[in-house]
Image (spheres, rainbow, N blue to C red):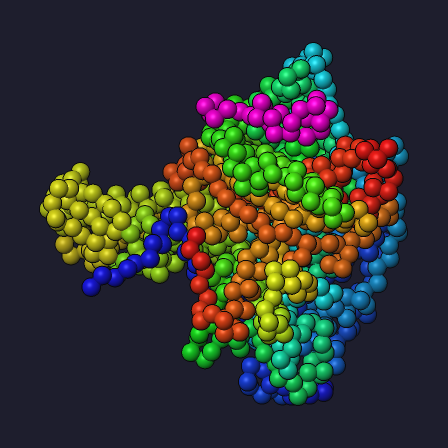
């Protein structure tokens, strides 16, 4: 009988292993977990952007029903501040200003939402009631809610030790060469732009449960984290001084992260510490309003960019000057985002020989800003791809032709950019050509004319982008200020009967790792997919790993698995050689079968595993029993996905409403393990990019009140705001990791915003529009349309 | 404390609640049906959608006491007792219409109600408009829309099974 086994290895769109539990309500997110005798924490937060705390009266709160304790900054005075994981040095060599980030406010609050006190009570409602009974005597201080206000002469000082509210003043690139190229240029094109401040808004609000075992002295923290080992390290070593061996951090099912759940947050330390103080589990769950004012925000740059060109449209030099908002405190990886994840990307896909960027990071009385999907790379890509379109218009060149003329050619890899990175592979012409064809760029003018007959302004725009991810080589990032290594760990545990458990330090919060990693292992070891289980998110089960961000899970974590599988296969060959009385060199392994080359003598992986665990007939003198291997993989370079995104929009001139009517993404993400999951990642990233381009903006008023502090005020994309997103891939392999993979988690959010804005500007070309800031809201567009008559009509 | 009696997924419960207790709190904390999620505090996200007397309702927007005597169905009550998934659940899996899974229960419950109210079928635009009350931050909705269209065909008997076309 022939049994048809569905192909489920590398390249198959296998349906996800995690879905049945999520679709039947059996996921276990942090707030779903209830510990015996659990108490609830409510955090009282500052209503002011900047204020001195003259006193906190907790007496009434402590007397409220069900209240177990009320803690303030004074109670946690011996506790360390939340540490920053990356140190940037300024132009003059001085280290960045790194003020303490207290867990609970110490004498001063610096943004709306800054934690001031915590109530622990028997129920959630009781904790909340009591928090409202705490009386805080604030002396309200002038606030600096914007970078402009923070940098103005006489601005309020947010921190002692950060004069002028400057965190650092950094630069990258060859200033002299860049200035010289500008001086000799045929044409200089410049523009100023801001990159709008965003709130990540993972659908699951952050939550944490602290637990303390009085018998063993062991703490356990369940938390909504993308990287439980990092939280254990930062919180254990720097904040609470709990040794790793006494601290377990579990990140169970996590409902989206997009960067916002990388960072170590105050609430994690609060519930862990309070659990120890009270001897009871303590749970905290953010409501969405709290998320808006306590989750790290993203982006928030103000930039001046200039491009020097020769008479043929070749880029000669790029000069960029950026202000980057850090918010009130340094979040875990904040300093790296507008520096080494931003300025290093300014070459884009182009051969620009000289680039100079300077970045000033500024403290303001706002929520801390840190990595959000793309982190630095969307900001770089936006300014570059807008600048290229503006340059094409002002040179009288075609937008596509100017890109082609400046692309790094496919035979120029490895390619050293003037901003530190060395790209290993790519083919920008190929992804551009594929996208132009898929989007029917050539046929656009007919669609524009058709839309015009309906009274609509139709435009098309593209962006050709690269990004750097798969982070990152430890020694390289260490030399740039990272206070961590960025390898990943993988353990392959082949059980006695041949099923496999995979332990990974990467963490899945929507990416489908339980499927993709299982596919990888099933493919390489020749084990049915159903017999491979992936374990992640628990420091007690998984060796020390660095987690998931920067599109690194497959490129770094998957590579660790490959290394571990190589060890399994090498050991298996020695066992097989013994069992089949052959020499090791003669044993081959292919998809689950060890064979003596050129013979029909074979042993299955399951047979080898059984022999390894029941070592009766076994080379016990020279080989340990068991079949389990761990590998740590430190990448040799970043990976460089790239591609082309094309957006087509229609504007209703009556309302200024922009509708994205077509979106085409052709991305080079290296080898694809599961095409269905890759397409989903790109579609989701594009949705966030379209959200940034058209809808989303965190808005503060001059006093530092967050006006867009709820889902009623902050405009997240809904189904009717988005078009179908056509996704295709064109692969060039990464040359330096064993899988040839590059990463797909962030490309959608990086490539799409400039494609959308380029399309909007194109739609408004008759109105003499040179640039439109994000988000391109109906109000913004309507104002442009109604301020100017179309040039053609004059 | 006042009492509320309601039927959830076919099982009758009588529970003491505070007057301010929301239906979603009763489901999650008293009945431990944690498949229904809370994603916001302004009735915007739809992660908490359940069926009350056959209609989709944001369970964060109903007091538990208002559900007295009601028939409530949550995501846990959709599959058949033998574990066979509802066509909408099946379609979400087949079309990769979920990533982190957090919005999924509410999205599935809202989608079932949407399809049931449109026996004549739904266009892509109608599906998108019909999802106005549900936010997803992961998928960009592309595959959710496809899944709902496919499930509608099966739920209305126009096709016998959910099967994604060959790629």
- Towards the viewer: A251 or B78: B78
- Give the vertical position of B7 relative to A343 (above or below): below
**x and y, in percent, of residue A85 in the image:** 60, 41
Where is residue A370, by image quadrant? top right
Of A619 and A671, nearer the camera is A671
Above/below status of A456 relative to A509 = above
Q: Residue at x 60, y 19 (%)?
A: A353
Residue A490 placed where, x, y %? Answer: 40, 48
Residue B157 left/right relative to A693: left
Q: Main secondary structure of the magenta part?
A: helix
- The answer to whether any part of residue A704 appears in the image is no
Query: Between residues A362 and A513, which one lies in front from this camera angle?
Result: A513
**Position in image of residue A209 (x %, y %):** 59, 63
The image quadrant where one finds the C terminus of chain A is: top right
**Image coords of residue A614 (percent x, y):** 20, 58
Q: What are the residue bounds of the magenta stretch?
A: A389-414
Against B41, residue A146 (above or below) is above
Is B163 on the left or on the right of A335, as rendered?
Answer: left
Residue drawn 62% across the image and 25% down it: A402
Name the residue rendered at 44%, 58% in the picture.
B165
Which residue is located at x 78 percent, y 35 percent? A766
Quadrant where the N terminus of chain A is found in the figure: bottom left
Evaluate whether residue A440 shows in this view: yes
Q: Is residue A270 magenta?
A: no
| Number of marks drawn | 0
């Amino acid at each position: 009988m022939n049994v048809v086994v569905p192909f489920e290895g590398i390249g198959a769109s296998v349906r996800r292993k995690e879905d049945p539990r999520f679709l039947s309500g059996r996921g276990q997110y942090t707030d779903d977990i209830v510990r015996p005798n659990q108490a609830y924490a409510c955090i009282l937060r500052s209503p002011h952007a900047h204020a001195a705390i003259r006193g906190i009266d907790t007496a009434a709160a402590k007397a409220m029903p069900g209240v177990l304790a009320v803690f303030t900054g004074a109670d946690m005075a011996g506790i360390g501040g939340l540490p920053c994981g990356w140190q940037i040095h300024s132009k003059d060599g001085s280290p960045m200003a790194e003020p303490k980030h207290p867990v609970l406010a110490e004498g001063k609050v610096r943004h709306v939402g800054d934690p001031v006190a915590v109530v622990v009570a028997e129920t959630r409602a009781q904790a909340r009631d009591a928090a409202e009974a705490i009386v805080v005597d604030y002396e309200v201080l002038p606030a600096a809610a914007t970078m402009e206000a923070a940098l103005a002469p006489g601005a309020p000082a947010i921190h002692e030790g950060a004069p002028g509210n400057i965190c650092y003043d950094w630069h990258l690139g060859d200033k002299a060469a860049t200035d010289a190229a500008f001086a000799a240029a045929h044409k200089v094109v410049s523009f100023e732009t801001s990159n709008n401040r965003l709130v990540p808004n993972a659908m699951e609000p952050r939550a944490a449960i602290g637990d303390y075992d009085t018998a063993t002295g062991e703490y356990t923290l369940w938390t909504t984290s993308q990287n439980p080992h990092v939280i254990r390290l930062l919180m254990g070593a720097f904040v609470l001084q709990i040794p790793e061996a006494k601290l377990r951090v579990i990140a169970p099912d996590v409902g989206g992260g997009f960067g916002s759940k990388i960072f170590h947050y105050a609430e994690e330390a609060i519930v862990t510490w309070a659990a120890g103080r009270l001897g009871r589990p303590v749970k905290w769950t953010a409501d969405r309003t709290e998320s808006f004012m306590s989750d790290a925000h993203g982006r928030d740059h103000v930039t001046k960019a200039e491009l020097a060109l020769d008479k043929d449209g070749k880029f000669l030099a790029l000069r960029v000057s950026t202000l980057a908002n850090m918010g009130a405190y340094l979040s875990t990886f904040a300093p790296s985002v507008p520096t080494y994840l931003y300025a290093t990307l300014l070459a884009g896909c182009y051969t620009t020989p000289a680039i100079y960027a300077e970045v000033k990071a500024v403290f303001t009385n706002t929520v801390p800003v840190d990595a959000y999907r793309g982190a630095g790379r969307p900001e770089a890509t936006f300014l570059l791809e807008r600048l290229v379109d503006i340059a094409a218009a002002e040179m009288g060149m075609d937008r596509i032709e100017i890109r082609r003329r400046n692309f790094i050619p496919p035979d120029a890899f490895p390619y050293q950019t003037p901003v530190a990175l060395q790209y290993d592979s790519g083919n920008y012409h190929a992804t551009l050509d594929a996208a132009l064809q898929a989007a029917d760029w050539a046929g656009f003018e007919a669609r524009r004319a058709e839309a015009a007959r309906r009274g609509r302004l139709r435009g098309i725009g593209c962006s050709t982008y690269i990004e750097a991810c798969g982070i990152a080589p430890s020694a390289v990032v260490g030399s740039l200020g990272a206070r961590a290594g960025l390898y990943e760990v993988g353990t392959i545990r082949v059980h006695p009967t041949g099923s496999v458990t995979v332990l990974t330090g990467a963490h899945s919060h929507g990416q489908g790792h339980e499927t993709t990693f299982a596919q990888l292992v099933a493919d390489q070891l020749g084990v049915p997919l159903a017999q491979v289980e992936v374990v992640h998110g628990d420091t007690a089960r998984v060796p020390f790993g660095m987690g998931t961000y920067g599109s690194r899970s497959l490129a770094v974590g998957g590579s660790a698995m490959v290394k571990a599988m190589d060890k399994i296969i090498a050991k298996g060959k020695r066992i097989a050689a013994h069992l089949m009385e052959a020499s090791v060199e003669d044993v081959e392994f292919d998809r689950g079968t060890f064979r003596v080359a050129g013979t029909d003598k074979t042993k299955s992986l399951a047979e080898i595993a059984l022999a390894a665990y029941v070592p009766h007939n076994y080379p016990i003198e020279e080989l340990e029993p068991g079949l389990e291997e761990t590998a740590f993989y430190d990448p040799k370079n970043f990976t460089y996905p790239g591609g082309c995104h094309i957006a087509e929009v229609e504007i209703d001139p009556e309302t200024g409403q922009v509708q994205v009517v077509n979106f085409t993404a052709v991305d080079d993400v290296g080898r694809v393990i599961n095409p269905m999951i890759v397409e989903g990642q790109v579609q989701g990233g594009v949705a966030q990019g379209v959200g940034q381009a058209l809808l989303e903006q965190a808005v503060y008023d001059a006093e530092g009140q967050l006006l867009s502090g709820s889902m009623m005020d902050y405009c997240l994309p809904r189904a009717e705001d988005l078009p179908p997103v056509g996704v295709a891939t064109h692969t060039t392999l990464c040359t330096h990791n064993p899988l040839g993979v590059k990463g797909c988690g962030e490309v959608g959010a990086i490539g799409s915003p400039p494609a959308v804005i380029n399309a909007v500007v194109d739609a408004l070309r008759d109105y003499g529009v040179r640039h439109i800031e994000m988000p391109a809201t109906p109000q913004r567009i309507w104002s442009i349309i109604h301020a100017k008559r179309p040039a053609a009509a004059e | 404390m006042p009492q509320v009696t309601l039927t959830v997924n076919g099982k009758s419960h009588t529970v003491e609640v505070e007057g301010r207790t929301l239906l979603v709190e009763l489901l999650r904390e008293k009945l431990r049906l944690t498949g229904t999620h809370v994603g916001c505090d302004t009735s915007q996200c739809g992660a908490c959608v359940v069926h009350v007397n056959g209609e989709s309702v944001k369970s964060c927007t109903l007091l538990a006491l208002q559900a007295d005597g009601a028939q409530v169905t949550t995501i846990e009550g959709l599959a058949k007792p033998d574990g066979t998934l509802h066509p909408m659940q099946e379609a979400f899996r087949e079309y990769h219409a979920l990533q982190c899974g957090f919005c999924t229960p509410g999205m599935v419950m809202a989608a079932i109600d949407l399809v049931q109210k449109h026996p004549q079928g739904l266009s892509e635009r109608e599906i998108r408009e019909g999802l106005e009350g549900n936010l997803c931050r992961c998928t960009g909705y592309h595959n959710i829309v496809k899944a709902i269209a496919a499930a509608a065909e099966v739920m209305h008997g126009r096709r016998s099974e959910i099967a994604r076309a060959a790629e």
